[in-house]
Amino acid sequence: MSIIKEIISGNFIKCLSFSVIFSAFTFFSFGQKQTAYRDVDVVLCMDLSGSTNGLLDNFRDKMWDIINQWQMYSPRPVVRIGLIGFSRYSFTDGSGYVRVFSDLTDDYDALSKQMFAVQPYVENGIQFVGAAIGTATTQLTWSKKPDAVKIMYVLGNGVVNLGSFDYRARCEEAAKEGIIIHPVYCIKNDKQLRQKEIPGWNEIATLTGGEFSQVYVNKRAPLVTSPVNLMALASINDSINKTFLPYGKNGIDHLKLMLSADNNAVKTYEAYFYSRLKYKMSEHYSARMLTWDVTSYKNAYPESKLAAVRSSVKADNTGVVDLEALAKNYSDTRNRLYQSLKSNFPEGEEDRIHKEVSAEEYELENRLDKTLIRTYHNTLVKEGFKD
């Protein structure tokens, strides 16, 4: 039986689709330490034509490494990520062969689902770079806060001035909106083609205050280098996932997204799965869980009172679940499992990586993950963030 079925139809409760009433408290208002936050929007525009095959796979496998590093600054970045694909004929020529896969969001589980839903097959297409930049600038919901940092990564290759989409004009529009574009050129084997194409990509950086970088699409290596016990982590995580009590209109949907993201991560590489679990224990994810998981709420607000929830309506009141006791039991169980999980984590890996990224001599090695982390770091430091 799946975890979702176990929660919905298992021993304790059929469904928490009823409204769960929390007395006298509201989210993020009780017992929360005061932390300074600042919006950081990051849009990834990915060339998904045949010449960059593997680019999306590379990012989605390493996304938890990257997200963990992107959050390690002060004030605390509230990072929203958007995803745009371009250069596939199936995206239709009316859009310039551009498709928005995800608007800017900090629901990374939903983002993971969107990325893994993209067809992995090789498809030819025309790289209308200007169209991709224009779509990212005008069709996504960028933060309106005056101190927000807005970053766009345009990843691909080819000449940038194809078609009627003036890339220079699109860059000027982005710059007026305060968007910094970091062009990332995906290296081709043909040296003559590279020499022809690279100047245009470099110009995009010049026009928008970004940094130009080059990567090999399929060059990968773990950022986390310490040994990781995948079997132990997966077993503990499976037990943790059985302590969730989804509530509200979208509770079950959030649970499904979480389990899907876990499943996608565990299929890749043990160090990548560790990074996924490290994110699941972050302050950001804990705050998100408050909005759909009763156990998380009870853990954050132990003095709050929870109303009883009925698993079925019967005249003699049988079937009434003592949600207070159940949530307390699950909260205690989860906290014990969290400690067990932490004991299996390699010590200090994120801090080591962050320290290396901050060093002037940090080598990008033409790797996608290192490039995204380093250019992001440089941007935030320029915008006044501290390590």
Image (cartoon, helix red, strand yellow):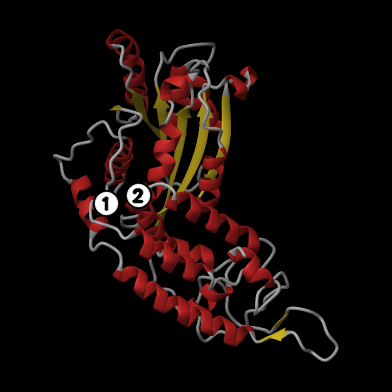
**In the rendered image, which quarter contains the C terminus?**
bottom left
Q: In front of the other: label 2 or label 1? A: 1
**Residue at x 31%, y 60% (from the top left corner):** 229
Left or right, residue 318 beside residue 252:
right
Q: Residue furthest right?
A: 315
- Secondary structure beneath dot 2 equals helix
Q: How many marks?
A: 2
**Image: 28 above or below 165:** below
State the residue position of label 2.
Answer: 65
**Image: 125 above or below 214:** above
State the residue position of label 1.
Answer: 224
2 and 1 marks in contact (CB < 8 Å) = yes
User: Residue 146 in the image: x percent, y percent?
Assistant: 45, 46
**Image: 277 above or below 143:** below
Left or right, residue 121 beside residue 312:
left
Crowding near the residue tagged with mark 2, few <14, some 14–19, many ≥20 C-alpha atoms within 10 Å:
many
User: Residue 2 in the image: x percent, y percent?
Assistant: 60, 63
**Residue at x 30%, y 30% (from the top left corner):** 211
Q: Quadrant of residue 210?
A: top left
Of callouts 2 and 1, which one flags the residue occurring earlier in the amino acid sequence?
A: 2
**Residue at x 65%, y 79% (from the top left corner):** 11
What amino acid type is highlighted by mark number 1?
Answer: Val
Left or right, residue 127 beside residue 12:
left
